[in-house]
Amino acid sequence: MTQTNRQILLVSRPTGAASVDNFRLVETPLAPLEPGQVRVRNHYLSLDPYMRGRMSDAKSYATPQPLGEVMIGGTVGEVVESLNPKFKAGDKVVGMFGWQEFGTSDGTGLLVVDTTHVPLSAYLGPVGMPGVTAWYGLNRIIAPKAGETVVVSAASGAVGSVVGQLAKRAGCRAVGIAGGEEKCRYVVETLGFDACVDYKAGNLYHDLKVATPNGIDGCFENVGGDVLDATLARMNAFGRIALCGMISGYEGNPQPLKYPALILTQRLLVQGFIVSEHMDVWPQALAELGALVAQRKLAYRETVADGLENAPAAFLGMLKGQNFGKQLVKLI
Amino acid sequence: MTQTNRQILLVSRPTGAASVDNFRLVETPLAPLEPGQVRVRNHYLSLDPYMRGRMSDAKSYATPQPLGEVMIGGTVGEVVESLNPKFKAGDKVVGMFGWQEFGTSDGTGLLVVDTTHVPLSAYLGPVGMPGVTAWYGLNRIIAPKAGETVVVSAASGAVGSVVGQLAKRAGCRAVGIAGGEEKCRYVVETLGFDACVDYKAGNLYHDLKVATPNGIDGCFENVGGDVLDATLARMNAFGRIALCGMISGYEGNPQPLKYPALILTQRLLVQGFIVSEHMDVWPQALAELGALVAQRKLAYRETVADGLENAPAAFLGMLKGQNFGKQLVKLI
């Protein structure tokens, strides 16, 4: 009984904007397991902005995704076959199997998770890499004090939604920046932020000023470009900027920072970071985030594309902000 | 015997570049001392880039210099009369009397210094605010490890010259950026940097690349603009940028940072700072710097303008990089 695996490969690098032509869907026969191996049927594939960086071969923090190989990505799924004593069929697992329906490995980096109180897909969102990213940037870089104002861009997204909710729990004024009225309403009404500024409304700086009457002490930046320029101009002395992403510049021309002198005049700290380089915080962060999700004290939202073949289009849409919350691809 | 004090007032704020017309020289009779007061004949006036910021009333870290008052500035001099038991005639003192020949105060902030082994003027340079600025940014922000590469702009200046020499003492490769062959030669031959790049030669990025074969781990930034863009592009992962000054943008239009995404991709720390907000480090820093100067282990250079009336022109020249080392005005 030879099964077939469907996979999406990166076959070319974008020049300018990424396109579906950079990807190719292939079918590959699944080889029988070897001793020590485990096979996982992936249920959900995570789509994340960092993947855009991997598609290019420009200097970056990670080696580029090799051409002709399965596109990188986080996955959750179920063990369907195991020749590894650490796993048994039926185990729910989180891994990095990438854009494919089945993953096969020796178990390295594969984590069995408990889905009694936390939905499997949440391990790709608030109880996964995006959640830990939010936790690290907020707690270890911004380190907010009660009463301070924290602003987060892409506030309805997988990372931003957690940042603002954690900031509120820390006693801060949480202000989001998001694209469109619907997302902004969600950020305030469902996520509980104090305010959310719609950057598409055309008055970004003015609206941000109104939403941050006491200035900004902590900025969790996911977007860059005009959004970061506006936030920077509202920063208070000794403010902290956790630089997590600059999605507005991932496609096309690099975006300058208009007034870097503010970093000096306001004595700001700006720290770029990648959560995978801070594995020491993951256990604590995941424990806290898992408890909050299990107790329904941390809201999150998912946009789910259906079927592996739709992953490229969903990914490109996410880069344009067409997702609403965590972008997933449902594989089964 | 009524003596006359000569003073320079700020009488208008620059629109665009500062000019001598922003200042006015006045003569004022010296009132007799009141009980508790001390009078100082200033010997040297310090001219520093931060003063340009005080001339404007734009949002900044300090309140603007009020119009019609004596221009702010550090001074060293000699007590000529004292009705304060803490000071006696002949004491050499460091203070903040500003652009005037005589200073009168209740002694607050006035520090008696020992000129046995350290020249009086050095207390405005390597053993004063510029020296502590270098010490703080290097030790507390860049925190270099032996073998790392540290780059400092305005390398022949009062701050930059100390940064590079301290970096060498810490076992680092010290690379300067300065304007012109003469300054670059001085930075290497006299100050002992490993290399110095002449930003006026027209090949800044290329020359910096050659001078930093292992990339840059620590950047002490005094200039901003193109200089910071070039340095940023050479930063290694986990590099630290101490943002001390951005003199290239003090006159005229703010200068953008072209590739802020590098802060993210290289996971850099960027920290703006003002040394006067870190008074806790001054005693340790001054003790170390004073010992090095006394032992002639720390070289420095001064450009001395003669006479209070020449202070405005000397200040404007400094903003254009016409000074070579610490810019002083000799008052007696």
Image (spheres, coloured by chain):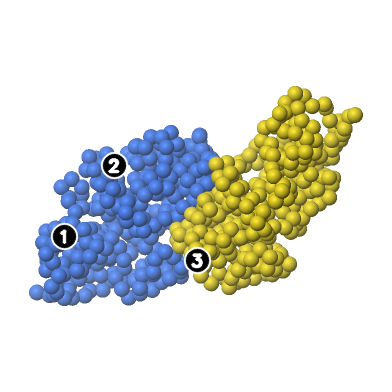
Chain colours: A yellow, B blue
- Classify mark 1: helix, strand or loop: strand
Residue position marked by numbered label 3 in the rendering: A147
Query: What is the spatial separation of the Cα atoms under label 1 and label 3, in whole angstroms?
Result: 48 Å
- Residue at image position (46%, 69%) is B58
Tell me if A300 is positioned left or right of A147 in this view: right
Task: Name the residue carrying label 2.
Answer: B298
Looking at the picture, which amino acid does disc 1 mark?
Glu
Q: 10 Å neighbourhood of mark 1: few (<14), some, or many (≥20)?
A: many
Labels 3 & 2 near each other (Cβ < 8 A)? no
Location of the N terminus of chain A by quadrant is top right
Locate residue A204, reporting x and y percent.
63, 68
Q: Amino acid at mark 2?
A: Leu
Question: Is A243 left, or right, of B195 in this rendering?
Answer: right
Question: Looking at the image, is mark 2 or mark 1 earlier in the sequence?
Answer: 1
Q: To which residue does mark 1 refer?
A: B78
Q: Is A283 placed above or below A217 here?
A: above
Callout 2: residue from which chain?
A: B
